[in-house]
Image: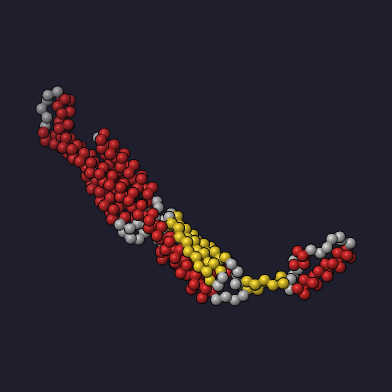
């Protein structure tokens, strides 16, 4: 069954007092594009996240966002009180020497080097990833579930339009057969009218009819178009990315219908061609979001 390229999935878990949330969104794109956003400390996880997405999605732009709420176990901030006191004393004396009014502010003190001490605590990111990976997988499960539901709706619409297109192709085939059968009679009537009762060379008439029928013959186009429609139907029921194959088949259908229209000298057949082009345009719009 076809999948849509539009979807959303979310999952979260709590690890050592921190909440890890994963959101995955996807929209249509000609190829697979994966964008991963992680907190700075966990950027090394991108090399693990990207293959997980690639294993589950064939096409589309997929955005993965990982958010960590709570105390960051990897960073610890402390104050060097001795350094702060020294800076305060120095700044107080400097103000007095320069004759400046006002007290020394806290912001003046903590801006000094070595007052605020930031330490990066060691953390086993490999082990932590082992706990976060299932969360990413659950978010992807949600994404695929939504893409599957959207894909079912797309498949239903595609089938409906294919049915309409197939019906018009069958009506066109019937109309072409009728026109072929009448071509000889019509040409004979016209010649008799033009010749004013003169005898018609039957052999010459047969040759002229054959030329007219061959010039207007669209049986091959109709056969190929019907074959493309059936291939289209089969692809809709196929698992895996089929969007680009559907795009190719649609191009071929457009080619056959355009040829049919260029050879048509019949009002009813011309109207059928216009309707078929409308069917193809609806199909084109729908497959833009098929994976």
* Residue shown at 12% from the left, 24% from the top: 197
Q: Between 263 and 270, which is closer to the camera in this rendering?
A: 270
Res 269 → quadrant: top left
Quarter containing the N terminus: bottom left
Q: Between 79 and 57, which is closer to the camera in this rendering?
A: 79
* Residue shown at 45% from the left, 55% from the top: 27
Q: Between 122 and 213, which is closer to the camera in this rendering?
A: 122
Residue 55 rendering spot, x and y as whole percentages = 41, 66
Res 215 → quadrant: top left
Kindly tell me whether residue 208 is visible in this rendering: no
Residue 105 falls left or right of residue 7: right
* Residue shown at 50% from the left, 65% from the top: 12
Residue 25 rendering spot, x and y as whole percentages = 47, 58
* Residue shown at 65% from the left, 72% from the top: 76
Residue 33 falls left or right of residue 268: right
Residue 171 rendering spot, x and y as whole percentages = 23, 41
Vertical position of residue 58 compared to residue 200: above or below:
below
Vertical position of residue 224 compared to residue 44: above or below:
above
Res 176 → quadrant: top left
């Amino acid at each position: 069954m076809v999948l849509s390229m539009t979807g959303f999935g979310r999952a979260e878990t709590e690890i050592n007092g921190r909440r890890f949330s994963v959101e995955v969104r996807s929209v249509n794109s000609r190829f697979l594009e994966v964008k991963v956003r992680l907190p700075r400390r966990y950027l090394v996880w991108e090399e693990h996240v990207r293959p997980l997405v690639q294993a589950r999605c064939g096409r589309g732009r997929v955005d993965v966002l990982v958010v960590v709420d709570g105390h960051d176990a990897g960073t610890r901030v402390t104050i060097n009180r001795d350094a702060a006191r020294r800076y305060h004393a120095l700044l107080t004396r400097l103000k007095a020497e320069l004759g400046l009014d006002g007290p020394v502010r806290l912001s003046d003190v903590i801006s000094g080097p070595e007052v605020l001490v930031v330490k990066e605590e060691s953390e086993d990111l490999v082990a932590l990833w082992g706990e976060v990976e299932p969360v990413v997988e659950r978010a992807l499960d949600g994404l695929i579930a939504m893409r599957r539901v959207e894909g079912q709706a797309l498949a239903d619409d595609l089938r409906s339009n294919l049915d309409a297109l197939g019906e018009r192709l069958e009506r066109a085939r019937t109309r072409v057969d009728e026109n072929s059968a009448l071509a000889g009679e019509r040409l004979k009537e016209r010649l008799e009218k033009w010749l004013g009762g003169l005898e018609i060379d039957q052999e010459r008439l047969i040759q002229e009819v054959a030329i007219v029928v061959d010039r207007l013959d669209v049986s091959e186009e109709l056969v190929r178009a019907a074959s493309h429609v059936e291939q289209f139907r089969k692809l809709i029921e196929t698992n895996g990315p089929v969007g680009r194959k559907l795009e190719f088949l649609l191009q071929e259908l457009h080619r056959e219908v355009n040829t049919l229209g260029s050879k048509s000298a019949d009002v009813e057949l011309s109207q059928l061609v216009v309707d078929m082009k409308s069917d193809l345009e609806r199909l084109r719009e729908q497959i833009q979001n098929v994976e």
